[in-house]
Amino acid sequence: MDLPKLAVAALGGTVCMQARNAGEGVIPTVSGETLLTAIPELTTLARVTVETLGMLPSASLDFEFLLSVLCWAKFQAKQGAVGVVIIQGTDTLEEVASFFEYLWPHDIPLVLTGAMRSAAQPGGDGPANLLDACRVALAHHSQQRGVQVVMNGQIHHASNVRKTDSLALQAFSSPVTGPIGLLLEDRVHYLRPPRHRAVLPLPQKTSQKVAMLEASLSADTLLLENILALGYDGLVIAGFGAGHVSQSWAKVIEKIARKIPVIIATRTGSGSTARATYGFSGGEMDLISKGASMAGFLCPRKARTLLWLLIGCQRQDELPRYLGSDMVLHH
Ligand code: ASP
């Protein structure tokens, strides 16, 4: 029987990490090719091409490198792969997933995975996550679902998934919605139908700078006041509660929003920003009237990724449309 073609790439992360010598910290050294030897059953499911495109802790990935990974993944799709799996560190998985989700133009699934335990640790979750991710990428009902993250037996959509625990095996969750699917007895089960996707063109430039600041109690305005002078092209605020800042921040944000796009998200870790509830100075109604956009359900990090991409393809004027599409609300 002709097995389907699956493309796998490793970028690094804990899943690829081990210590060179006893007592030393783990660093990424294990190639994608070696990772696949831990899941020999994959050869009965697919013809696999595997490449090691990077060997980085995920904190050191950047958007330019991710564009080259995207280019590789698109090439694999053109070469007939039925799915693509990318193995990387978990620390920035939520941002990378949404970066690819905004740009992935194909019907075939792009699946991201990693591990919370390193390659050499007892009970390492890397092989199980990798096999699960491959199963998701190969499943015919994964078509038209865009970019998904597979970790610890769960499937999360790129637009909602967040790393919500620093070290636990169950480190990923999708606040409000929960996972979109599960792996049970080696089978892929979706709990929801595919959703509408809005795919952006590739950015024509990559030099744009988007700052991100978190509101905190009694914070001064020094950094905020210097955002324009420092040459930033966009600003994301992780605001209090439903998307709020102090009165002093609100005054500065008004000046900034006259010049560059400003998005206010919530720093709470779950839920949406408000639009029409709070009227105080620094509340969401005030910030909207001062020219800021509310992130809705997008977390601050994903909002920053979106803004960077929109500025890169000169579509920042369409920000409201893309902020509105991150979660479908049924009225
Ligand atoms: N702790 C991280 C991980 O889980 C390291 C990284 O993101 O590269 O992979």
Image (cartoon, rainbow, N blue to C red):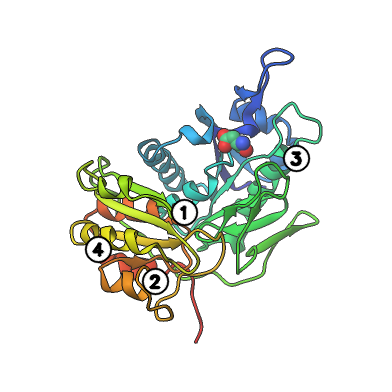
- Answer left or right for 270 relative to 255: right
Number of residues whose C-alpha sits closer than 10 Å to that of mark 3, classed few (under 14), some (14–19) or many (20 or more)? few
Q: Position of residue 315 (x, y in %)?
A: 24, 60
Q: Nearer the viewer, mark 3 or mark 4?
A: 4
Label at residue 216: 1
Q: Nearer the viewer, residue 168 or 237?
A: 237
Number of residues whose C-alpha sits closer than 10 Å to that of mark 1, classed few (under 14), some (14–19) or many (20 or more)? few
Tell me the distance, in whole angstroms, between the alpha carbons under discs 2 and 4. Answer: 13 Å
Residue matched to label 2: 283
Q: Quadrant of residue 106?
A: bottom left
Q: Amino acid at mark 1?
A: Ser
Residue matched to label 4: 254
Q: Quadrant of residue 21?
A: top right
Residue 152 visible in the displayed image:
yes
Q: Quadrant of residue 244?
A: bottom left
- Label 3 secondary element: helix
Q: Amino acid at mark 3?
A: Glu
Q: Against 136, is 229 above or below?
A: above
Tell me if label 4 and label 1 are in contact, CB under 8 Å. Answer: no
Please identify the residue farthest to the front as the structure is shown: 218
- Residue in the image at 64% along x and 48% along y: 133
Q: Against 41, is 147 above or below?
A: below
User: Which mark is first along the chain, 4 or 2?
Assistant: 4
Residue matched to label 3: 41
Q: Nearer the viewer, residue 1 or 31?
A: 31
Q: Amino acid at mark 4?
A: Glu
Q: Nearer the viewer, mark 1 or mark 3?
A: 1
Q: Position of residue 292 (x, y in %)?
A: 30, 66
- Label 1 secondary element: loop
